[in-house]
Amino acid sequence: AEPVYVESTNGYTMCAEDLRAKLDAAQAEGSPIKFLMLTHMRGKVADMDTIHDLAEERGVTVVEDCAHALGIQWEGVQLGRRASVACYSTQSAKVINSGEGGFFCTDDEEMAARAYCYAGCYEQLYNQHVVSPPAAVFDRVKRQTPNYSLRMSDLAATCVRPQITNIEQRIARYNEMYERITSQIADVAEFDIPPYDERVRPVKDSLQINLQMSDEQVGAFLAATKRRGIPAGLFGSPDNARNFRCWEYALPKTDLPRTERLIKIAIDIRLPATFEPEDFDQMAAVLRAARDDVMLA
């Protein structure tokens, strides 16, 4: 398979118009796109109706990377429900934290059976699952599917279960703290904080800002925040996994000028669940002070 990359909007989401153009171009070349990997990076949500409609019109299978989207809803429905497959993470920085781990979700019985077999449900161990596809589906796939022993441990599962019951309360607190910090920096002209789509119920567990600064000023700002105790990340950094130029295993075949410009100014700051309200006030003060260090120098 050969990946085809789609431009990002300034809100860190897949650009529906560029997706349409890439789908049309591939169709015209006689090599239509078969799969769409839709990523909700840092919980930012694209125009889901348009993107899924485009995929359905062209017979494209959608896989949603919901690693950052657990608890996020589009028009009242959890992200991933409309996709053929959705994958969620419970890694240590996520809304549900089990250290490592995650979920594979699908309504497709064969995909589910293959996932069970990949995880290690050999010799009818799948019968121990509370929810499983019919045995006939396993009989059809189990001898063609290798066992990678990717099971979640009992300890990780024990960490996950109690967090499910209070996820709504924790989401409310994340969103409250996000509003607390952003309200204190909203008047800074150099801080462009992309808004959320009104159709989204977000989980605001991190803060992204498009810095309206030169490349040199962006570097100085990051140094100033780090010096003051906030190690903000730059999406365009050579060491940042979200920088597509780092993906030497699958480099883009076409230019992505909008995304290239965006990642040079887009910074990323975690909003830890363990912080108190006063800590977010201090973070806002640090961001303002770092801005002053750069712009008033």
Image (tube, rainbow, N blue to C red):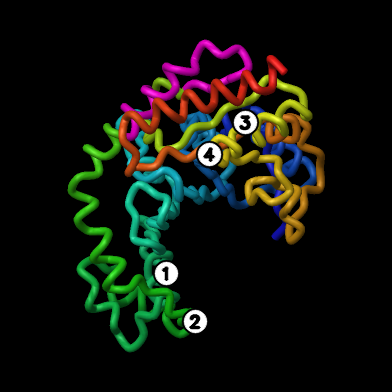
Quadrant of the image occupied by residue 121: bottom left
In three-dimensional space, the C-alpha distance between marks 2 and 4, rounded to whole angstroms, equals 47 Å
What amino acid is at disc 1? Ala
What is the magenta range?
174-195
Specify which label sits upstream in the sequence, 2 or 3. Answer: 3
Q: Which residue is mark 2?
A: 146
* Residue for badge 1: 115
In the image, what residue occupies the spot 40% across and 38% down?
A: 205
Q: Secondary structure at mark 4?
A: loop
> Disc 4 marks which residue?
229
**Is residue 175 a member of the stretch shown in magenta?**
yes
Q: Position of residue 26 (x, y in %)?
A: 74, 43
Q: Give the residue type at disc 2.
A: Pro
- Residue at the far bottom in the pictured view: 123
Instruction: Pinpoint residue 128: horizontal percent, then vertical percent.
Output: 22, 77
Horizontal side of 73 relative to 193 (left or right) equals: left
Query: Going by the image, does 172 lie left or right of 51?
Result: left
Q: Which residue is mark 3?
A: 15
Q: Secondary structure at mark 3?
A: loop
Mark 3 or mark 1, earlier in chain = 3
